[in-house]
Amino acid sequence: MEVNFDRLDFDKMGGLVPVVVKSLINGEILMLGFANEEAVRRTVETGFAHFYSRTRRKLWMKGKTSGNVLK
């Protein structure tokens, strides 16, 4: 997956961009979250969805503890 970081405006929301995850099978929305630049980079590098938790103020990988990962 390629991401054009020039098109992502991390400044508008204090370093975050909204992220919508949809199923490739049926188009159903699976999750809405937020990502900072590091989360987007890790998602691209690993192939697994990473997000930024606004409440915990830290990066996290979806499913790391539950096993319900988003690839």
Image (tube, grey):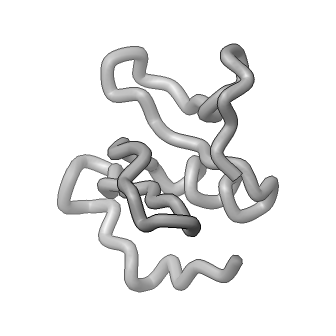
In percent of width and height, residue 12 lies at 19, 61
Q: Is residue 36 rendered to the left or right of residue 44?
A: left
Asked if residue 43 is positioned above or below residue 58 in the image, the reply reads: below
Taking the spot 50% from the left edge, 25% from the top edge, the residue there is 58
Q: Is residue 9 above or below residue 56?
A: below
Residue 64 appears left or right of 5: right
Task: Tell how many labels.
Answer: 0
Q: Quadrant of residue 28?
A: bottom left
Where is residue 60, by image quadrant? top right
Residue 52: x percent and y percent?
46, 36
**Residue drawn at x 60%, y 43% as measured from the top left:** 50
Percent of width and height locating residue 29: 36, 53
Is 37 displayed left or right of 12 in the figure?
right
Residue situated furthest right in the rendering: 46
Q: Work out which residue is located at the far left of the displayed protein and give it.
A: 12
Q: In terms of image quadrants, where is residue 54?
A: top left
Q: Quadrant of the N terminus?
A: bottom right
The answer to whether residue 57 is above or below residue 3 is above
Query: Quick one: 44 or 23, which is closer to the camera?
Result: 23
| Picture residue at 50% right of the left edge, 77% below the top | 5
Q: Residue sitting at 71 percent across and 49 percent down? A: 48
Position in image of residue 9 (x %, y %): 31, 70
Viewer-proximal residue among 3 and 48: 48
In front here: 11 or 19? 19
